[in-house]
Image (tube, rainbow, N blue to C red):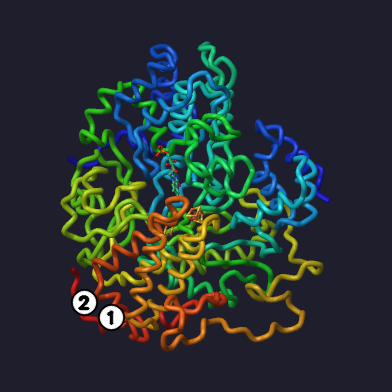
Amino acid sequence: MAEHRLLTKDFGTEGLQTLAVYERLGGYQGLREAFQRFTPETLVDEVKTSGLRGRGGAGFPTGMKWGFLPKDVFPRYLCCNADESEPGCFKDRKLIDENPHQLIEGLLIAAYALQVNIAFIYIRGEYFDQRLLLERCVEEARAAGHIGNDIHGSGFSCDVIVHGGAGAYICGEETALIDSLEGYRGQPRLKPPFPAIKGLYGKPTVVNNVETLSNLPHIVQRGGAWFKSIGTEKSAGTRLFCCSGHINRPGTYEMAMGTPIRELLEEECGGMWKDRSLKAFQPGGGSMQVLLPQHLDLALDMDAVQQAGSSLGAGAMVFMDETTCMVNVSMRLVDFYHHESCGKCAPCREGTYFESDLMHRLEAGACTSEELNTLADICDNMNGKCFCPLGDTATWFVMSAYKAFRDEFEAHCGAGSCPVRSGTAQLVTA
Amino acid sequence: MLGAATRKEITALRDRYPHPRSAILPCLWAVQNEQGFLTVEGMTEVAEILHLVPSEVQAVSTFYSMYFQKPAGAHHVLICVNVSCALRGADDIVGHVERRLACPSGGTTADGAFTWESTVECLGACGGAPAMQVDHHFHENLTPDTVDALLDRLRSVPGAHAGAGATPSGPHPPTAETPPLATAEGPPAGAAPPTERAETPGPRTGTTANPRGPRSRPRRRPRPSPDDL
Ligand SMILES: Cc1cc2nc3c(=O)[nH]c(=O)nc-3n(C[C@H](O)[C@H](O)[C@H](O)COP(=O)(O)O)c2cc1C
Ligand code: SF4
Ligand code: FES
């Protein structure tokens, strides 16, 4: 079982970014069929049947999320979350770059199911060319009657607005995204009320990831039951895995859920580079806990990876070879969270600062071993005590690395420089 | 005063949303496109068109890292140093660019051609690591040679200022009136030299009374010197 191509099946077709080519390959049929074969209610049920789970990180069942919208409260809003900034993650960019109309079609199908008349695509500021591309595609789709009033005679009207961010990871968090879209500093809001009840402009709002929405045209055309038959019992369908780090062929690979991680590494990614061996890897992006070579036989399945103490998160896989310094990697991730903390709550705002300060000194070999306890203490004061998951996740990698590579952390203490880089460390991993 | 075209764009953006305030971010982009950075006057005009007070617009602008609060070079170079890029040699690229452009991360070159910075913000190009963005366009699988070739080519391309991205809209501010900044945070060239300031946190020997260590915020973090990389 190699790559299982569903979302990526047409990737690489010349001109796929234009409406003409997309339609020639069957594009926007899903939207037409949605109007013909489904009412909004039965469409929500079909998505429930499909077992589709959110691809943005949390893996929440999409149909269930849609079902939370209160009846008879209008207007409602739909936001596509294209703020992808998780370290190691680049699938949403790929999906937009290669097949933007697939996303727009999915967005319109979701809008129909939810009876939304204005749908937003919130795209991160760094994806500048991608924003221009989406804007062009939205205009193309509008001109062809896929967007606008009374779409294809269905009586359903929907407008799509592409909204560019300006460089803030936290705006990927759904309530912060809503704040940002309303024109405020993008800081998370207290939940409950959940966005499904009170979101954008105080109205019921659904936020879905790019990949989640891109699945919808396929689910409509081929049926929820068919979709459910791909992958595993609890993780239906395929996922795009963003593979990077010390591998021979970095890139995005679409795999059916349930495939062993080893297969992804050895067959798709071409194994570790320079004939080196794997030291550790991170499934799910910068936020998630480190896993070790013995975990390679785990299935790419949200629950299996969760049981091993990590998470598939947003589907990023960062592989690190034997020469990697785990303290250095931890330092960069901690720096990232320090940089991206929105400053709303103290445990995260202050905690990431102290964490980052300590990690920099540890990396330079200027910490005492007592300070490692301080590090654990800081993390303990953050994990589970922050206002939003960013603060919690800022501790996950470093704590899991500390557990698995304790010798390496200790070897840095008082070493005066990085012992891994200078090759003086005799390291045994747990 | 913003140009008529920009004012028109801002008005159109305002009318695109159910609530005018939602247009702040795109309007700030429009200001930066025209002026090269967010001028106080530009933000005041945005506030006026969106029926807000100027401080609200300014407060929003400082949250987002891609807006320039001060003039920048003609081209903006952003190099990712997050994990995936670091694993494939981003630090070498950063060291190389630092030497080539002869100014620290966050600074503008003396000729005003480049503002560059290294960032921990993953750019979403990890599959092509090490990666950078120049004027919002991706450049991946970098080597010192490809970076050199690109910088040489860009030096001869005038016009596009960093805020403008794909569509250059005229020459950029670093002219006689707005001299480029010599250092990351220092005053403009020609002003009084900055007073010495500890760049690195002082040595921390022994334990302090506070088990969490001193609570003072160190200044900017030291960047590893190229020899360490
Ligand atoms: C700090 C933080 C950052 C996030 N960043 C993103 C992101 O960049 N893209 C994304 O789709 N979801 C992101 N999420 C998850 C969203 O909050 C939300 O769960 C998701 O967009 C829901 O879409 P889904 O149900 O389709 O997965 C982030 C969450 C947190 C806490
Ligand atoms: S945990 Fe961090 S990012 Fe989240 S609200 Fe608190 S300060 Fe902001
Ligand atoms: S880590 Fe550099 S682009 Fe993602």
Q: Amino acid at mark 2?
A: Leu
Q: Earlier in the sequence, mark 2 or mark 1?
A: 1
* Mark 1 residue element: helix
**What numbered label is drawn on residue A318?**
none
Cβ–Cβ below 8 Å for labels 2 and 1? Answer: yes
x and y percentages locating residue A334 in the rendered image: 42, 65
> Where on the picture, by quarter, is residue B102?
bottom right
- Given residues A53 and A23, the one toward you in this image is A53
Viewer-proximal residue, A319 or A208? A208
Residue A427, label in figure: 2
Query: Which quadrant of the figure contains the C terminus of chain B?
Result: bottom left
Q: Which residue is mark 1?
A: A411
| Residue closest to the eye, A31 or A413 | A413
Residue drawn at x 67%, y 51% as measured from the top left: B168
Q: Residues within 10 Å of mark 1 (few under 14, many from 20)?
A: many
* Image vertical order of residue A79 relative to residue A30, above or below: below
Residue B144 seen in the current view: no
Residue, x 70% and y 58% (percent of image)?
A: B37
